[in-house]
Image (cartoon, rainbow, N blue to C red):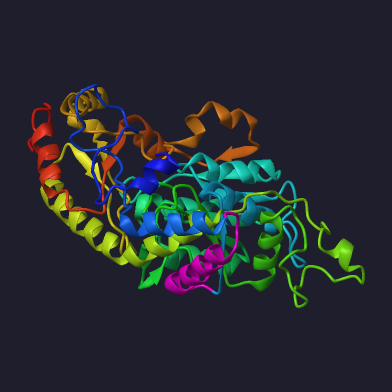
Amino acid sequence: MSILQAIKGPAAPVVDGTDGDCGPQDIRLGLTSSTFGPEERTAMIEVIDTGMLTMGRHVREFEERFAGYIGGKYALMVNSGSSANLVAVASLFFRKEKPLKRGDTVIVPCVSWATTFYPLHQYGLKLKFVDIDLETLNYDIESLKKAVTPDVKMIVAVSILGNPCRFDEITGICKENDIILFEDNCESMGAKFNGRYTGTFGLIGTFSTFYSHHISTIEGGLILTDDYEIYCLCKSLRNHGWTRDQGPESPIYRTKEDDFFEAYRFILPGYNVRATELQGAVGKEQLKKLDGFLKIRRQNAEYFKELFKDDRRFIIQKEVGESSWFSFTMIVRPESGLNRKQVLRVLKNAGIEHRIITGSNMLRHDVVEYFDYENTGSGNADTAHDYGFFVGNHPVDIRDKIDYLYESLKSVQGATV
């Protein structure tokens, strides 16, 4: 979606899209919806009229409101969820006590998006891949426990497609073994485990505000932490690695007497991944709507689960805690007699967009040849990779489209619906 399209509207969400594998006919159920209305349009125009377009007041206000909503002390906005992961990982190498070092081992799930893994590789960490639970699509807890060895310094917990991890188990593992917990929560804004928002269980949590996610700033992401040193490190790394906006109380550097030099003093090997005022202004409007978006997504999910609960052809995602239901995953049961190509052909012909589950099994992608990694087991991840797909959920009522999905899949030969 272009900036011009975003500014123009639409006035109400639509459930069409072009991001999935579908035929040339009209899309009947897309993967994404626009959540922009007149409020976002007005907010962007007001920013443009001020002439102040780079990171400023609107970004700061969005950060403060987001932290207040989710329940963290410090939020920092960047230009994408991927950049949030990059900056957050980098910060752990520069903290004063127990910094990560190149060669340290970090546990990761086999199934996640690519940029869960890339910053870890780019900073020289060894990735230890752990299998998933086929129903929740998150860590298989027993496999996770077995993967913990003295060389493991961090666990990356990814709540896949809105579904919370078992944080009671994972936080216990981390505390018992003095391991950092890093949450990649980019797919799961608004999800809760035991009444607490995901993204707040770890030392650091990351979020995405990409166009297709729970709220949208077109592109964008956030880092959340209760650790002031980590917050200061991330703030510097986001902005060229310089000292600006740190303040005299910052724990990561000491001011010098030369004010002229101080304004452009570089202390960390950072990046320029700043957000724009347009993103901050839109984020404030979107955050006001998040509760409503989540309510509708969950209503759609209850309807989806009710329709497909007894369909033995498919494994549907088992909810842990309160999912924010990014999408609806379906895995063709290997014993059903179906193959995925049959199912995807029906979806394509019906105008129902679909795609692989997140990035599917990262161990099956060519890029893994560049990683320093260990595979502790990936049988369930392979099944999700070979038999799984997802279709879109939306922040508008799509029960009629879920009916259409259900009726379309009836034609696929297999076990009794």
Q: Do we see residue 365 in this rendering?
A: yes
Where is residue 91 drawn, in percent x and y? 69, 58
> In the visual, does 129 lie left or right of 392?
right
Q: Which one is in front, 110 or 94?
A: 94
Q: Could you tell me which residue is drawn at 31 percent across and 27 percent down?
A: 21
Q: In the displayed structure, would residue 22 be above or below residue 170?
A: above
Where is residue 99 drawn, in percent x and y? 74, 60
Where is residue 93 drawn, in percent x and y? 73, 56
Q: Which one is in front, 43 or 325?
A: 43
Task: State the extent of the magenta-drawn residues as a range.
Answer: 52-72
> In the visual, does 284 lie left or right of 23?
right
**Which quadrant holds the C terminus?**
top left
- Residue placed furthest toward the front: 49
Q: Could you tell me which residue is drawn at 78 percent across and 68 percent down?
A: 252
Where is residue 158 drawn, in percent x and y? 46, 53
Q: In the displayed structure, would residue 288 be above or below residue 301?
A: below
Q: In the displayed structure, would residue 170 be above or below residue 360?
A: below
Q: Do we see residue 145 in this rendering?
A: no
Q: Which one is in front, 77 or 330?
A: 77
Q: Could you tell me which residue is drawn at 24 percent across and 23 percent down?
A: 23
**Which quadrant holds the N terminus?**
top left
Q: Which one is in front, 88 or 64?
A: 64
- Residue 71 lies in the magenta stretch: yes
- Residue placed furthest toward the right: 257
Q: Could you tell me which residue is drawn at 66 percent across and 66 percent down?
A: 230
**Quarter of the figure with residue 246:** bottom right
Q: In the displayed structure, would residue 246 be above or below residue 112?
A: below
